[in-house]
Image (spheres, rainbow, N blue to C red):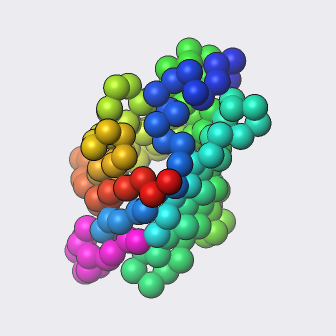
């Protein structure tokens, strides 16, 4: 991990409480599903890390995730380690430069942008299919509430 504090990087734009709205796109026989809830990002452990707490409904299913975000050695990329209430966990890498927010995981990626004076994040999650194509599966919009 790097020795830089979050507040010295663009990742500080995440800090705050966000209203989360989105939709899981229709796929095959699965209908489109709404996503609503909150995402909270707070600086922890001396400001070297961010604790991200997601509490959302995906359709009728409650999804809760804790994620620790920390900078890597280069200080321009973050490691995102997450755990959720389905018992799964994983690690992804993210970059946030200017207004462009990107996250890359195994067979999963997010492309997003900060808008409206950094009070909004709009983006799309994509997953890799068995045919090695990237397909959009989730559209998300976060609006800062505090």
49 within the magenta span: no
Closest to the observer, 82 or 140? 140
The correct choice, above or below, for 36 with respect to 83 in the image is below
**Quarter assignment of residue 110:** top left
Q: Which residue is at 29% across, 59% downward?
A: 139
Residue 5 in view here: yes
Furthest toward the front, the residue is 146
Tell me if I can see residue 90 in this picture.
no
Pinpoint residue 103: horizontal percent, then vertical percent.
42, 39
Depicted 77 relative to depicted 53: above or below: above
Q: Is residue 137 left or right of residue 106?
A: left
Q: Report the magenta residues as a range.
A: 24-36
Residue 32 quadrant: bottom left
Residue at the image position 51 percent from the left and 24 percent from the top = 9
In the image, what residue occupies the spot 60% across and 57% down?
Answer: 53
Q: Quadrant of residue 118?
A: top left
The residue sitting at the right extreme is 45
Indicate whether 75 appears above or below 114. above
Query: What quarter of the picture does the N terminus occupy?
Result: top right
Instruction: Estimate the x, y position of residue 67 in percent, counting from the top left.
Output: 62, 50
Q: Pick whichever, 28 or 19, lies toward us.
A: 19
In terms of secondary structure, what is the magenta stretch mainly? loop
Residue 43 % position (x, y): 65, 40
Q: How many marks?
A: 0
Q: Nearer the viewer, residue 9 or 112?
A: 9
* Residue depicted at x 32% and y 57%: 141
**Residue located farthest toward the bottom when viewing the structure as drawn:** 60
Residue 105's spot in the image, x, y percent?
47, 42
């Amino acid at each position: 991990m790097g020795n830089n504090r979050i507040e010295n990087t663009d990742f500080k734009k995440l800090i705050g409480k966000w209203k989360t709205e989105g939709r899981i796109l229709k796929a095959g026989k699965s209908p489109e599903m709404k996503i609503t809830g909150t995402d909270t990002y707070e600086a922890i452990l001396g400001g070297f890390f961010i604790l991200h707490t997601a509490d959302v409904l995906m359709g009728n299913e409650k999804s809760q995730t804790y994620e620790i975000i920390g900078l890597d050695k280069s200080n321009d990329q973050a490691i995102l380690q997450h755990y959720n209430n389905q018992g799964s966990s994983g690690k992804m890498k993210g970059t946030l430069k200017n207004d462009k927010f990107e996250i890359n995981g195994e067979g999963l990626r997010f492309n997003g942008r900060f808008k409206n004076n950094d009070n909004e994040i709009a983006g799309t999650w994509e997953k890799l299919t068995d045919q090695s194509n990237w397909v959009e599966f989730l559209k998300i919009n976060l609006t800062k509430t505090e």
